[in-house]
């Protein structure tokens, strides 16, 4: 790119625009959803672009990406767009190509018969899940990410391919409470949680960890330096004040001798009612409604069941255009728990209010 002096950072996005997008940049007059998964953009120049949105499993094989590129070459002059919610968008400029593209996408199936390129994810439906990567690449996950997302979206595929809900429902997943996914502000959020403090491997900690860095990494100041004797030798190590530990795993990020993953303690929490939009009501943080569900690979049946239950209860009771959090606030969170048949406990309904200026979070509930 002109005037660019290094190759650090992402390349300038405009160089990847399809020609019709480049030509009409800033001139779009309207956009509409003409059917689930198909958007129509009309420019003041008279140009029209149809966008077909399909869901992906996010973790894609090279064969899958080759197939996407083959489709893009055939119908879209080689252009294709991945969205932030792990959908793919194919752009075409006439209705005949649109028809042929849709038929082609629908004809591509997995050996089991399911659609390889399901069309949907628009308007008042469930679009693909924003999520992190879990066991695939990170060091602090309490759960897998892609595996749960696959199980949940397999179950909700009808809501992806239709627009029958009161409003859009954004689902997110983060595999630990660092929340690389948008868990704090999604209609329904799946969060991986640790429930035990890190283990401390005294015999190797001083060799693999910078102790001052470990102390500084703890947001609650729970870690203190310590000395222990092993086989008659003094070793520098640390101790964790368990009552202050919130199981965040930050110390493990800095120190591999403080592992936090635990097969029994780790699991899933579900939060509800967040959003980033300011349409109708102000943006909201999600609230904790189910504090713990065990990890259940490979299909996470209990998590899938609760996500569906919350979604269908919302679909049945909410008013048109009402997001999940707006519905729960209108009827009262007490009623939300009753309708969804979620057992209430003292650990639910954390709304982060105290987290603005303390290390604690709150359990705010109106009875
Ligand atoms: Fe890693 Fe946590 Fe982010 Fe998952 S949410 S990718 S475990 S930091
Ligand atoms: Fe501190 Fe988090 Fe480590 Fe607990 S898990 S000791 S809160 S850094």
Image (cartoon, helix red, strand yellow):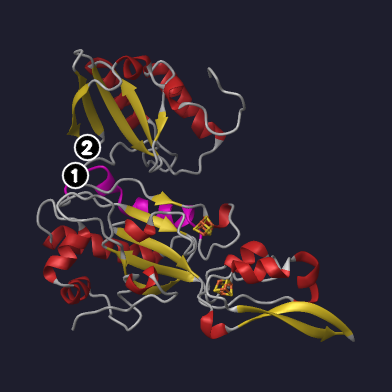
Residue 169 to residue 90: above or below: below
How crowded is the residue under tag 1: few (<14 C-alpha within 10 Å), some, or many (20+)? many
Residue under label 1, please give it. 163
Where, by quadrant of the figure, is residue 75 drawn? Answer: top left
The quarter of the rendered structure image containing the C terminus is bottom left
Name the residue nearer the viewer: 280 or 110. 280
Residue 95 lies, in percent from the top left, at: 22, 18
Residue 250 lies, in percent from the top left, at: 58, 66
Question: Is residue 20 highlighted in magenta?
Answer: no
Label 2–label 1 contact, CB within 8 A: yes
In the drawing, what numbered circle is on residue 36? Answer: 2
Ligand 2, by image quadrant, is bottom right
Q: Which residues are magenta?
A: 144-164
How crowded is the residue under tag 2: few (<14 C-alpha within 10 Å), some, or many (20+)? many
Q: Earlier in the sequence, mark 2 or mark 1?
A: 2
Rendered residue at 46%/22% (across/down): 70
Q: What is the spatial separation of the Cα atoms under label 2 and label 1, in whole angstroms?
A: 6 Å
**Apparent side of residue 187 relative to residue 132 in the rendered image (left or right):** left
Number of dots carrying numbers: 2
Residue 137 lies, in percent from the top left, at: 59, 52
Residue 47 to residue 314: above or below: above
Rendered residue at 37%/42% (across/down): 114
Q: Secondary structure at mark 1?
A: loop
Question: Is residue 150 highlighted in magenta?
Answer: yes
Rendered residue at 26%/75% (across/down): 342
Q: Secondary structure at mark 2?
A: loop
Name the residue nearer the viewer: 302 or 288. 288
Residue 264 lies, in percent from the top left, at: 54, 76
Magenta segment main secondary structure: helix
Name the residue nearer the viewer: 285 or 3. 3
């Amino acid at each position: 790119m002109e005037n660019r002096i290094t190759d650090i950072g992402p390349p300038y996005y405009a160089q990847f625009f399809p020609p019709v997008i480049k030509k009409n940049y800033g001139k779009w007059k309207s956009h509409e959803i003409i059917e689930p998964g198909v958007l129509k953009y009309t420019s003041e120049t008279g140009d029209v672009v149809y966008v077909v949105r399909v869901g992906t499993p996010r973790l894609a094989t090279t064969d899958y990406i080759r197939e996407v590129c083959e489709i893009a070459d055939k119908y879209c002059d080689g252009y294709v767009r991945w969205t932030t919610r792990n959908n793919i968008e194919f752009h075409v400029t006439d209705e005949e190509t649109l028809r042929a593209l849709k038929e082609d996408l629908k004809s591509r199936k997995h050996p089991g018969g399911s659609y390889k390129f399901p069309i949907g994810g628009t308007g008042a439906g469930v679009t693909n899940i924003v999520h992190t990567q879990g066991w695939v690449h990170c060091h602090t996950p309490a759960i897998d990410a892609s595996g749960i997302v696959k199980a949940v979206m397999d179950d909700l595929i009808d809501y992806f391919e239709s627009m029958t809900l009161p409003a859009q429902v954004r689902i997110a997943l983060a595999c630990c409470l660092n929340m690389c996914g948008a868990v704090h502000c999604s209609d329904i959020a799946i969060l991986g949680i640790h429930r035990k403090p890190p283990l401390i491997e005294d015999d190797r900690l001083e060799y693999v960890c910078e102790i001052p860095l470990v102390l500084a990494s703890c947001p609650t100041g729970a870690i203190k330096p310590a000395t222990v004797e092993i086989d008659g030798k003094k070793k520098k190590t640390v101790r964790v004040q368990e009552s202050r530990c919130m199981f965040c795993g930050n110390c493990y990020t800095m120190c591999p001798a403080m592992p936090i993953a635990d097969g029994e303690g780790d699991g899933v929490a579900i939060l509800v009612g967040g959003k980033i939009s300011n349409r109708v009501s102000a943006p909201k943080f999600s609230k904790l409604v189910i504090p713990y569900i065990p990890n259940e690979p490979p299909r996470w049946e209990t998590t899938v069941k609760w996500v569906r239950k919350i979604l269908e209860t919302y679909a049945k009771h909410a008013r048109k255009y009402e997001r999940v959090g707006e519905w729960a606030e209108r009827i009262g969170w007490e009623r939300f728990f009753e309708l969804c048949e979620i057992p209430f406990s003292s650990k639910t309904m954390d709304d982060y209010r105290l987290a603005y200026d303390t290390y604690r979070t709150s359990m705010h509930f109106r009875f």
